[in-house]
Amino acid sequence: MKSDSKKVVRKTRGKEPVICVVDVGNSHTVLGIFKGTKVVDYWRLTTRKETTSDEVMNKVGGLLGFSKIKTDEITHVGLSTVVPALERPWIKALDSLLKKRVQVVNSKNCMGLRINYQNPSMAGADRLCNVVAMREAGFKNAIIVDMGTATTFDVMKDGAFAGGVIIPGINASLDALTEKAARLLPVTIEWPDAVVADNTDDAIRAGLLYGFLAQLEFLIGKIKKEIGCDDMPVYATGGWGKTIARRTSLIDKYDPFLTLRGIRLVALNGDATNINSEESRDTEEE
């Protein structure tokens, strides 16, 4: 169901805004460049939790050198991170490299998004961005399944973030299983021919993939029942989103850039009083 609320996007006078967005996840970091609403470049990096601002600046500067967009064309910068220790290095690097203040996504600058969470500040920035992006697309109710290190089911009800579900991601499940079970070794993750496997490797694969799929379909059904909206759309995003979306009819669309779209909107429209890049620029990492 789509909302009739008006879209609000501030534009640079006479030109389309050019926005650099960064989504720092537990395992991977995605860097993207938007021109207006279009993704013109993006890169996927391994998240290194001990990285410094100099290392970030060197990596990002190198990647932007291959972009169609020059750094001095960038008008806005947005950052979402679920790794608190990396917030300061990324702010400092982006601020120094792009000479623009960095809008860091948090529960207070998501364009007036209602957050129905016991402690709104504990809601993941990436989860809020997913809902902001869906609201901007015109939806009032929706489920966003973001499949990364953790898989989150982000629920949008009446245009607000209504909470959701968090379960281990596929790779995290494999790591936990092989770490705790002495005779089970890591396997390549690919779909086995059948659920009932005649060897240990395929048995692990079947449990991981078909088990995850069954869990996903069950939770989608339960969420729709609790919300009382059987026709609410289900979008998938994240590293495993495309693979899983192909295997179930319950996912309506896969959008690899959904979280980045939300960061873009916050970068353009977020409350600038929540930016503190000056402090981050002057403070060295410990």
Image (cartoon, rainbow, N blue to C red):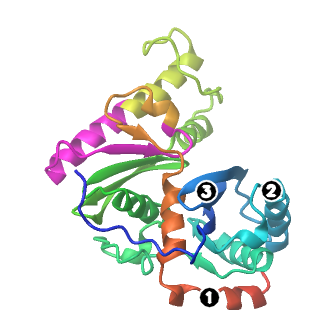
Q: In this figure, which residue is indicated by the disc labeled 3?
A: 26
Is tag 1's residue or tag 2's residue first in the polypeptide sequence?
2
* Horizontal relation, residue 42 to residue 106: left or right: right
In the image shown, does 209 or 179 lie closer to the viewer? 209
Report the residue marked by disc 1: 276
Q: Amino acid at mark 1?
A: Asn
The answer for how far apart the CA atoms under marks 2 and 3 are is 21 Å
As shown in the figure, which amino acid type bears the numbered disc 2?
Answer: Leu
Residue at disc 2, secondary structure: helix
Quarter of the image containing the C terminus?
Answer: bottom right
What residue do we see at 59% from left, 19% from top?
201
Residue beneath the point at 35% across and 77% down: 112
Residue 231 pos. (x, y %):
20, 42
The vertical placement of 224 against 266, above or below, is above
Counting the numbered discs, the total is 3
Question: Eyeballing the image, is 28 above or below 252?
Answer: below
Residue at the disc numbered 2: 63
Q: Residues within 10 Å of mark 2 (few under 14, many from 20)?
A: some
Q: Is residue 108 magenta?
A: no
- Residue farthest left in this picture: 228
- Looking at the image, is mark 2 or mark 3 earlier in the sequence? 3
